[in-house]
Image (cartoon, coloured by chain):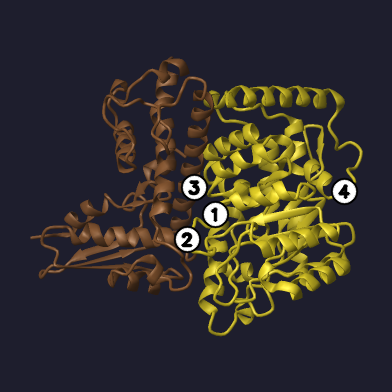
Amino acid sequence: MYEKDGEQYFVVDSHMHYWDASPENWVAGHEQYAKGWIECFHAYMGLGPAETHWPIEKFYKISEETLMKDVFEDGYVDVAVFQPTYLKEWYAGGFNTTEQNGALAEKHPDRFVVNTRWDPREGDQGLEQLEADVARWGSKGVKLYTAEWRGESRGWKLSDPEAYRFLQKSQELGIKNVHVHKGPTIWPLDKDAFDVSDVDHAATDFPELNFIVEHVGLPRIEDFCFMATQEPNVYAGLSVVTGGLMHARPKFFAKVMGELLFWVGEDKMTFGSDYSIWEPKWQVEGLVDWNYPSEEFSDYPEVTTATKKKILGLNAAKLYDLEVPSGCGIDEGAEAAAARDDAQLVEDKAGAAV
Amino acid sequence: MTDAAHLLAALDEVRDPELDEPVTDLGFVASCTVSADGVADVRLRLPTYFCAPNFAFLMVADAYDAVSAVAGVRRAEIVLEDHFASTAINGGVAARSGFVESFEGLAAAELDDLRRDFLRKAVLAGTDRVCRPLLAAGRTTDDLAGLRLGDVPPSTDRERLRARRAELGLPAGDEAPLLVDAVSGEQVGTEALPLHLRRARLTRVSVEANSGVCRGMLRQRYGTPMTDVEEDR
């Protein structure tokens, strides 16, 4: 819970991790990839405020105490959503697994949402594993990393027939939310790996699932925004946007937020700290204080307290059926104003699309 | 005698196809030397170990072509450093193999389509760069619909847009309409214009934000200094 100027914000960190990238976990013969991956993550941390930077030794693997303090005690987060990424080609025990996350979640009831993952290349065995993971951890969401390496394969698409089997199975198992994370590789390698058109196909064909595109499709924000305007079940996950731009590139942060508010809208944007790439504290404080820096941005949609409450927690609370404490909602006056803004936005877009 | 300045001038023409900026401005040229007997040695570096291999390949191949064409260069050695696919890319470019052969079994086609798709994004982003000052100066969107490229006051942004359009085979002369569809080259009609301009702005924000992240990551990785371009972002 974060409180500022008499307003209370229910904070859901909808995209965070608990990883083990320590050298002891690097797969023999693939050390360069394991090292390259975590060093790349660590460089991203450098885009946040200097006082929040850690030495790489700490970054490799953090303790339970560090996580609980950074996220809940100092970071104002009420509920955090674990998003696993296995990368077992490089990390022997997995980089960030459902089991690692789930074990921590069981020690701290009501603090975490434990998402799981799947990989269509694992076939029938993968489907069985998904069923077992959902049964064991009660997962309502999955995180999908399409650039994950597996043997000779360098990635997959959501529109692959095998992926559709997994989406179907996810729906049957009660999964509601699919968090999609694009990366630099895919099959075939000559295609743009960051392209989000496969999410478009899947979102159309699985209207009961919500697709949260993490880091708003960065570096393809334009493709993502265009797709999101056409698909009611596509959301903008703000991980990396806040962490990577708000401090390092404030002007671009404002432009990206303006574009997202225009094309996607404040009801479909969710905060994610990407912990432990970046700590949530400065991101939550910064978002609550944030507004466009100058008149130059006046043709973007207005940012209100209601906008920030939705982005920081209320939207994710709806996706994950989380109970919002009284006092953290949006008062009726503000809600009505937001509804008017939305209606205006739809009109503007319809006008623009003629 | 050929010196490093000649090579750098040639490398100024090599762009990151995704960011549409010269590899020199982006800080991707780590070093650049030429020996007395005409052997050029260029070291390239990227913001991360995992930068997309297809774009990396295009930059190394384009650098190879640009440097090889410099008068006095007998042989060009272009080395991409610190990248997961350095071996495949450097070897493939040096052997003049295509992308498919360099990444055997992992690629289905050469990179012409990829390059074209990103040139189209460059045209859209460039359209915003040229149109925004006109709108700020009081021109209406309807005014823009009637303008020709030659009606726009000369600027580097206009010439950059013209060059990208020419590269795609789109109309690029002074008589060509200012606003054309980046795929068909057809003039954008008045009704489609507001959406076209919004797309142009969005594309520019996306590409420039991406460039901002890449520059920041390169600095984290190599301790390179902050440039003037970045200060404004």
Mark 1: few/some/many CA within 10 Å (<14, 14-19, 20+): many
Chain depicted in yellow: A
Instruction: Chain letter for mark 1, please.
Output: A
User: Mark 1 highlights which residue?
Assistant: A194
Which residue corresponds to mark 2? B52
Q: Which residue is mark 4?
A: A322
Q: Secondary structure at mark 1?
A: loop
Pointers 3 and 2 within a single chain: yes
Select label 4 or label 1 by which is in front.
Answer: 1
Disc sitting over residue B210 in the figure: 3
Chain under disc 4: A
Label 3 marks a residue whose chain is: B
Could you give the CA–CA distance between mark 4 and mark 1, rounded to whole angstroms? 31 Å
Q: Residue at x 59, y 54 (%)?
A: A51
The answer to whether marks 3 and 2 mark residues whose Cβ atoms lie closer than 8 Å is no
Relative depth, front residue between A265 and A252: A265
Left or right, B27 with respect to A184, comes to: left
